[in-house]
Every structure is written in structure tokens, then in C-alpha cells.
Amino acid sequence: MLLQLSSDQEFFRETTDKFLTDQVPVEVLRRLRDEAAGYDADYWRRGAELGWTSLLVTEKHGGGNISGNGILDLTIVAHEFGAHAAPGPLIATNVVAAALAETDSHPDVIAGLLDGSTVATWCIDEPGRRPLDVDVEIRVDGDDLVINGVKRPVEAAEQASHLLVTGRTDDGLTQVLVPAETAGVTVTAMRSVDLTRRFGAVSFSDVRVPRAAAVGEVGQASAQVQRQFHLVLALVNAESVGAMQTAFDMTVEWGFDRYSFGRPLVSYQALKHRFADMKSWLEAGHAITDEAAEELGTGDDRAAMLLSAGKAFIGDYGGELIQDCVQLHGGLGVTFEHDVHLYLRRQTVNRALYGTPSQHRQRLADLGQQRDEAAANKVDA
Amino acid sequence: MSDDNVEDVEAFRQRAREWIRANLRRADGPGQTLRGKDEQQDLAEVAREREVQRMLFDAGFAGICVPKDYAGQGLTPAHQRAFNDELVGYEYPARLQVPPMTPCMAVLLEFGTEEQKQRHVPAILKGEEIWMQLLSEPSGGSDVAGALTSAVREGDEWLLNGSKIWTSGAWWADWGLVLARTNWDVPKHRGLSVFILPLNAPGVTVHRIEMLNGNREFCQEFLSDVRVPDSDRIGDVDDGWTVGVRWLFHERMQHNSPYVTRPTGATREGEKGSILKVVRDAGRIDDPVARELAGEALEIGLVTEALNHRVARGIMTGTMSDQAAAVGRLLMCVSLSRQSTIAFEIAGAAGGAWADDDGEAAERGTDFLMRQTPSIGGGTTEMARNVIAERVLGMPREQALDRNVPFREVPRGSARQ
Ligand SMILES: Cc1cc2nc3c(=O)[nH]c(=O)nc-3n(C[C@H](O)[C@H](O)[C@H](O)COP(=O)(O)OP(=O)(O)OC[C@H]3O[C@@H](n4cnc5c(N)ncnc54)[C@H](O)[C@@H]3O)c2cc1C
């Protein structure tokens, strides 16, 4: 998280932190495991009142941010979500709200997202494909758009009343907002290691919506999709770093309190050095996340590389960090009773979604090559 | 820094860009891995770097963050960063940065007397004086405060005796910053003092050491009755460790130092540009395995850079202690090691045997042999981990047998005394 929050940002962070501490302590998280939605509708509405879904929506549409960089502000919430392993469709609702506001479409849905009465989600990933490699078809048929194909995993698929679907129309990408009850839409629940976050597979079989349901221009959505993807990466990274921070803090505390051979664990150099490595990964996770969010919010073209670097690094090293926290807890670390797994779960799911570390490294090579070619052209010119 | 007349960073950047393009040569020659092998070439390069430093000075780009009183520009770290951004792809006085600008000049600025600063800082900025740090000794570098080189007072002078080692570039440098023992009857940290010394002073012998890649940049200095005037002492007598602590801090901050002029991204000595060039020259640009490895090199490079920005900002604003510099340093060393391994892996068989026309794929085996260098020089990664655990996270200190005992009674090993 940011090293220095403005007083407004700090107030906002504290409010969310307090609310989460109060509403979803670890006992509640454990209980939510058995609930269908994984969160309480009233909890979500109250969170929305705190501003969780309004930061990326312009004032014209009823939203507003704190610092001028709404993405950066929202990463503060995402960080707290990770730090508390909090429930609720934070990423799903925000990415849809941002897309609708940016394209000036579906104002009624935006209003519902803002006050927390509506949940919407983005259907982007497809089975066996890399992120943004889209095969679902959105065909133009007279005044209608017709959708065919399967999206999975989709966060909060069963809870969402609206689905933002990204599909292919000839050579271009199209996005459309589909009410979940539309004929031909089938949602099947999936299973996940996260205790409170739900995912589903959504299949579209000749799903027909009016052309007016399109979000942005038909066949022209590719830049918008990139922006949504970048936004998701910024939030996922911030959330995972929050989870790393809590796991690390509880393990440091444990290391001071736990004695072995008459000495605290943190007096052994072998373990001190591992804590030092973890500290460097943790700070690096904060650093890359904040730098990326800062640049994404100000439209810098380095953001894409920074986001993928963060996604790969936090996926790999965040996993190593929390697994080492498990290791240093000994037997306790692998019990359901101990809390460390709550954060391991959150980081683990985030690592797998929206591109694995390996896929982001490949994307970095592509982006790096484009950057080098652009630089070479600039020097030639 | 709160000067109201400070030039706007973007205007400065524009001015820097124009000057760099009009005056500096493009750095598209071979890398510097062979540095220290060909004496004539080395000396020619040092001469050119002094010349470039002088050009920077004359154009008003030397010592961007050094106060105007000492012939610097009195600008901010943001100006230095802008200059470094613009320098990408151009020659620069690489040897005159670390250790000359930091830690040496940084220590002078912090602890030097007015007279010392007036005499040396402008000379450093003009490229007339190149400074080196004489810290490590054959008996040990991690335990810096255990220095055995002694300084004994004789009237207005000090007589230095002992040996310093691993001083990169001492054979072509001009001045050294020396940590020496001035009192053997107090615990180790309380009996040290810092001196400055011309490397051609009578009694100083400089030997070159060959590294495993053939590089002969490293030196050992033997000091035999070297006379140093008391006016060349930095800090108080027996209080050299106060200077030493900041000296090591400036050393650890070298990748964030506002005194260092170096193209952004070229944090590695001998950096040969983008890892993707290695992939291309190895003939593997379409090989997904090589591409993913290159992606990893980019990943950890970007993350390390972001971490260094965070740590620098944290220390500057006081949200992190000075000791946090070790956090940035640790990840940087580990990342550089990994990047060496990656480049070597991508090079394939060319990593083991290469031809002159292998381009960026050549010499990767040599780099790999030298892989641990950054993790040793400037303090080892083990020492960085100790600092993080003990000073940043507050964990118990390691047992030490040299505390609260007169230094002369501290046990010493027999290896390389
Ligand atoms: C490229 C390069 C440039 C250098 N430039 C300079 C220079 O300009 N000036 C200068 O003075 N020196 C310089 N050095 C020397 C460098 O600072 C020392 O090599 C370094 O501090 C380690 O000291 P040492 O070699 O004596 O190893 P030792 O201190 O003997 O250490 C040996 C090993 O033991 C480990 N170790 C030691 N103590 C501990 C401990 N308490 N806990 C855990 N592990 C420990 C070390 O990490 C290391 O792995 C340079 C070195 C290199 C490689």
C-alpha cells in the first residue's frame, strides 16, 4: 500500500478497515464458507455506502474519487480486502461500473451498483485460453446481438443480476450487458479454494439481446477491454499484497512469541534470514502495485508492463511468502483453525485468475519487444 | 530544495535532452565485461570518462543535487532522475559514479570540514579527482568495524600502517577514504577514525588482483608508514564509526543515490541492454521458453526498480528508517543474480562456448561465473539479511564476542590476516 496516504485517503482506509474488522472477523469468514453467496447482501450495501463501488464512476454518473486517481484510491480498498480476506464482489462490480460509466451506457445499472443493490460481473476468461484470448461469439442479427459460447471462471456469477460479456464480432471485440435471467444463459456453480468468493461457469446458447444492450461500439471494444483488464490486475495485485501483509505480520508476531530450545524462533539466524527475504518480497509487492496503479491512473504507457510484472511477481513470491508463513507455524499452519490459510486462499486464487505468473511473463516479453521496437524507431526518426 | 527559483523539472529535462544528444556519443559499443583486462584501453576509457565528467560540469549537469556552494547545481532528486532518463543509450562516466560520487563524495559532504569540501567536491565534479573507498581488509569485509589498519598520531600527523583490499579501480584512481584503528584499548566501534589519502602518497603500494574472469580492476593496497596530516581526518578521533555507519548507508543507497548520474535501468555494471537482444542473438526469438525467461528478467528488473523508488521515498520522507536501504539492496542483488542465470540459460550452448559474432549471446558464460559479484561487493546479501532482521524487524542480534571488550582482546581467526 501507499507509503503516504493523504488524510482523506487515510480516513477512507480506516473506515473500511474498521468496518471489515467489525463485520467480517475471522469467525464470520469461517461461517460464510457454508453460505451460498459467501457474503451478506446488507453487508455489501453498507460497504457500497462507504464508497467501495463509486471510485471509478465519474461525478456525472453519481460517483467520485478522493485523490483524482480513482484507481489508486480503489487499490486502498482492495488492499484492505486482502488484508481481511474480506468477502464481496469488489473487483467484479467495480470493473463493470467503470466500463458502463466510461461508455455512458446503462445508467440504471450504474445507479444500482453505486448503492449496492445491484451486483454485476465481467465474463471474460474462457476455458483453456489465455487472458483476453476471446472465442465467445457475439453476432449482429438485425437489431439484435446473439451470443454463443462459454465463460469461466466468472466471479459472483450466481449473485450477479447483470453480466458484462466480452465476445468476438468478426475481427473485433464487442461488449454487451446481459441480464442474468435472459433466455439461453445458464450459470453453473464452480468450486474454489477461497472461502467466501464464489465463481461460476456461464454458458450462452443463442442468447439474444437488443443492440442497445451493447457497451460501447460493436466490434470496437478492444481498447476498453484492455483498460478493464488492467484495472482488474491493479486490484488483484493490491488485494494479494494485503493478504501477504497480514500473513507476514501474524508470522512475525508468532516468531517472537514461539520458543524452541529456550529461545524465540526469531533469534535463529536461519529463520531471521527467511524473514528478511519475505520482507523484501512484501515491500517489493507494495512497490510494484503502487507504481503500476499510479501510472495506470494517470494514463502512463508503462502501466501495462508494470501490471504484468506485478501480477507475475506477486503470484510467485506472494505464494512463496505465505507458504513460508505456513511452514514457520509448524503443524498449526495447516489447520483450519489457524487463520493463515484465509490469506493463503485469497492470494492463491488471485494468482490463478486473470493470467498466471507464467502467462504474464510471456506477456512481458511481448510488451518488452514492442517497447524496444518503438524505442528503435524513435532513435531512427 | 525549497528554493523558489528551482528550474522546472520538465524544462530541465528538455535542456538535458538537447545537450546530451548534441554532445555525447551513443553507447552502442560492446559491454564492459572485459574491463580491467587491457591496461591501455582501460586508461583511455578512464581519460574519456574524466573528459565527459568535465563536459557535464561545464554544461551545468554535474552534481545536480550537490549544493551550489560546492560547485553543484543545487537541484532535486527529480532533476537527477530526469537527467538519468534522458541519458539512456548514451555514454556516461560510469567509473566516476560508485564509489566516487557515493559513498565517497556523499561522506565528504556530510562530514567534511568546510575546507575539505571546498578543496575536493568541485574537483570531483570536474572529473579531476576520482575517489575510492578503502574499507575492507584481508581479515574481513563484513565485519568492517573490525579494521586492523592502524593510525598512530605523531604531532600534527598520523602514521598509517596496514592493508586494504578489494578496492576496485585503485590503480587509476586519485584519492581514498580510509577507515583505520586509532585506539585498541576500547571496544571495536569506539576506536576507529576516518582519513583521506592521495593514493600516490609515499608508502602506499597498490597491487592489482586478477578476478576469475581475468579482470584486473581489483586492488590491494599496502600502507607502510604513510603520513597523513590531521587536517585530512574526517570526523572526530575515535568516532570514525559515526562516519562509517553513514558511509555504509550511502553505499547501500547507491541505486537510489541523488548523486549518481547513470542511465535509468543500467543498474548493472556491464549491462548490455535489453534481455530480448540476448534472445534474438541466441536465435530464440520465437521460442516460448526463451521468451518466458526473458519475461522473468524484465519482471524482476521492473519490480526491483519500483522497490528502490519506494525505499528511497520512504527514507526521504522518514516513513522508513535508513536501515530499510538493505531491503532494496537485498532484492536487487538476488535479482541481478537471477538475471545473469537467465541470460546464460537463454544463450544455450553459446553460454559455454561462443564466437565473436554471437552478439549479445556472447560472454554470458563469463557473466554467469561472476554471478555472485553484486551479492558480495558493497556488503554481502547475508549482511543485508542480518540488517533487515535485526534493524528493520527488530529481531534479536546475533551473539557477538567482540562487544564491550577492548579490541585488542577480541579473538581473531588465522585466515588471511
Ligand atoms: C565487486 C566488488 C567490489 C568491491 N569494492 C570494494 C571497495 O571499493 N572497497 C572496499 O573496501 N571493499 C570492496 N569490496 C569488498 C566487499 O565489501 C567485501 O568483499 C564484502 O564486504 C565481504 O567481505 P569479505 O570478502 O571479507 O568476506 P567475509 O566478511 O569474510 O565473509 C565471508 C562469507 O561469510 C558471510 N558472513 C560473514 N559474517 C557473517 C554474519 N555475521 N552472518 C552471516 N554471514 C556472514 C558473508 O556473507 C560471506 O558470504 C568489493 C567487493 C566486490 C566483490
Image (tube, coloured by chain):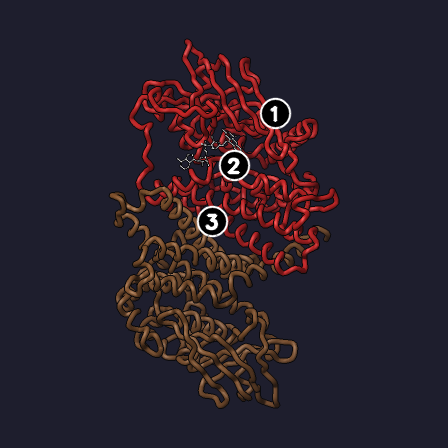
- Mark 2 touches mark 3? (CB < 8 Å): no
Q: From the viewer's side, name the closer residue of B277 and A286.
A: B277
Label 3: state its secondary structure. helix
**Are the residues under badges 2 and 3 in a single subunit?**
yes
Q: Nearer the viewer, mark 2 or mark 1?
A: 1
Which residue in the protein does label 3 denote?
Answer: B307
In percent of width and height, residue B368 lies at: 59, 43
Please state the total of marks drawn on the protein image. Answer: 3
Which residue is located at x 59 percent, y 40 percent? B369
Numbered tag placed on residue B259 in the rendering:
2
The three-letter code of the residue at mark 1 reads Trp
Can you tell which chain is drawn brown?
Answer: A
Q: From the viewer's side, name the closer residue of B18 and A78.
A: A78
Which residue is located at x 55 percent, y 15 percent? B201
Q: Dot 3 surroundings within 10 Å: few (below 14), some, or many (20 or more)? A: many
Separation of disc 2 and disc 1 at Cα?
21 Å
Q: Is residue B126 left or right of residue B115?
A: right
